[in-house]
Amino acid sequence: MITHQIDTRCTASGYLALPASGEGPGILLLHAWWGLTDIFKNTCERLAAEGFVVYAPDLYHGQTAATIEEAEQVRGTLNFDGTILDITAAITLLRSQPQVRGNSIGAIGFSMGAAFALGMSTNRQDIGAVVAFYGLEVGPAYTSARAAYQGHFAELDKWETAEDVTMMEDVLRAAGKEVTFYTYPRTKHWFFEENRPGYYDAGAANLAWQRTIAFLYDHLRYN
């Protein structure tokens, strides 16, 4: 964990993972409503092993949740404007890393984090690729975004319905954006997270990972 500055009065922390090659495109990783738990830190390391410089800000400032009830409670205390400041500062820190190469960065988010990643792409011209895992953000005007989009969604998801996913895809296409969404049969929300028994699906998680890495390579390789 490292500390980064939010403004002249506040600091925050996050997890930085560096590739063995010593340099690579930058990736911002935004955690789900569980907080910055080991599953997301491990995902940072997996991305670094693929050649990316990865930073995951701790949007809960040290708090984590183990159950849905705990996550709902912690998520309910989140200040939206403050979280946007946290993410903006995290992008600044990521882009300042001497190992980062390329003119744009990627953003990958999970559930709550996916909504933030999608939304941030509308006002950050330096976000060139967004990967959303079972999270949506329909409201913003995506015409201002410069990113390409990939999404991974569950067929049996009580949080994000098939209709919601189709609406999100239509919004991005109407804005003229490159978008590819995948829905994984017989999966549930959180299917990527191996510490979620009853939700994790190894086959779907592995396929989504392969697609994610290929997408990030295509759009961020020293562009």
Image (tube, grey):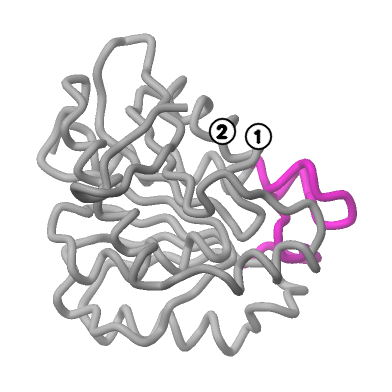
Residue lying at 46% horizontally and 32% vertically, measured from the top left: 15
C-alpha span from label 1 to label 2: 5 Å
Left or right side of 196 for 154: left
Please name the amino acid that badge 1 sits on: Asp
From the viewer's side, name the closer residue of 66 and 17: 66
Disc 1 designates what residue? 38
Residue 163 shown in magenta:
no
Outermost residue, front direction? 9
Residue lying at 79% horizontally and 42% vertically, measured from the top left: 195
Bounds of the magenta segment: 183-206
From the viewer's side, name the closer residue of 220 and 185: 220
Q: Which class describes the residues within 10 Å of circle 1: few (<14), some (14-19), or many (20+)? A: few
Residue 204 shown in magenta:
yes
Residue 219 appearing in the image: no
Disc 2 designates what residue? 41
Q: Are marks 1 and 2 in contact (CB under 8 Å)?
A: yes
Residue 77, relative to residue 43: is it above or below?
below
Left or right side of 42 for 147: left
Q: Which mark is on residue 163?
A: none
